[in-house]
Amino acid sequence: MDLLAALHSFVRVAATGSFSAVSRETGTSQPTISRHIALLEAHYGTTLFARTTRSLMMTEDGRSLLPHAYEVLEILETAETVLGRRRASVSGLVRLGVTTAFGLQLTSRINELLGQHPDLSVEVIMRDGFGDLVEEGLDLAIRVGEIAEGSLIARKLGAVQRTLVMSPKHFTPKSRLEHPRELTEEPCVVFAYGGGRQDWHFFNKEGEESVVAPGAVFRANSSEAALHAIQAGVGIGLLPGFQVRDLLASGELSEVLPAWKVPPMPLYAVHTGPRTLPLRTRTVLDFLVEISTELVGAD
């Protein structure tokens, strides 16, 4: 069992790049994590990590061992499930980082999950910016857009359609906009995922494409703040379709340029590993996979 614990520590150090990060997330002392790595290195007669006072880099032998370590841990998890060692109720806390709009949708459905697993607790941390999962102590996170960090393990949940909307309170000189280029003459509300320029990309069924740099009179890094500004008539804005669908149905908002569409953005659930998750975390992930298509739409 010491070897298995050492393999688990190894894959976590490989994912996080830090002994101290693994120590914090597992509640184990850093010397214990160091001993686990030393045990593996002695067992295999090699060096798995090149260490300096400022950096930790995996060696070629370490990279060779990593997929086998994952496989061993996955086989063990499968065996425990098959043999019924996890028949006890799902229990414990799962910390889930979500975007604001998705988080509000999720909370309307969370009782379905908690009703099935009364010993399970879920803490939702809502923010539209991307943080570090290990530093924030997150078990899972929802990410919109392609995943840049190679250390994250991602499960695609679906695709987020986006809709250009405005409020009846918003006055536009033209009764109806016909082409995206006209947006440069309109006050716009921009939901900014990050810094820098925020272009809007459009296409229509004829295959024509148009890229617009909206004239932002209001910018926000919160989708809820952007939505409230649009509802108040500040300007035209581009928001996740699932965030505005009820407002469109009620007539509180109207779609702008309905003949033009915006490419969808992929939606992922991500974690730092191992690929074999604790049962409580796996249960939450499976629930997200189950309801995500209904919440945000299919690919």
Image (tube, rainbow, N blue to C red):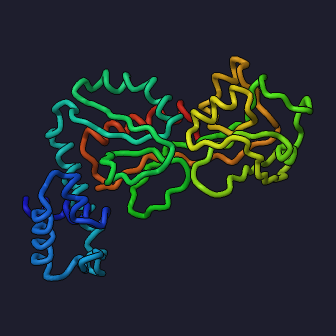
- Considering depth in this image, is 69 or 215 the residue closer to the camera? 215
> Which is nearer the eye, 69 or 101?
101
* Residue 33 appears in the figure: yes
What percent of the width, then of the height, locates residue 146?
54, 55
> Which residue is pictured at 78% across the width and 54% down the height?
211
Determine whether 63 is above or below 97 in the image: below
Residue closest to the far right: 174
Q: Residue at x 51, y 43 (%)?
A: 128
Q: Position of residue 230 (x, y in %)?
A: 69, 31
Task: Work out whether residue 259 or residue 233 is closer to the camera in this orientation and state it.
Answer: 233
Relative horizontal placement of residue 266, taking residue 217 as reference (left or right): left
Looking at the picture, tell me which residue is in the foreground, 34 or 223.
Answer: 223
- Residue 146 vs 245, above or below: the answer is below
The image quadrant of residue 72 is bottom left
Q: Position of residue 22 (x, y in %)?
A: 22, 58
Q: Is residue 39 left or right of residue 204?
A: left
Above or below, comparing residue 298 to residue 273 in the picture? above
Residue extending farthest to the front is: 217
Task: Name the residue located 14 percent from the left edge and 40 percent from the top edge.
Answer: 85
Quadrant the C terminus occupies? top right
Task: Specify the farthest residue to the top.
Answer: 250
Q: Residue at x 22, y 27 (%)?
A: 119
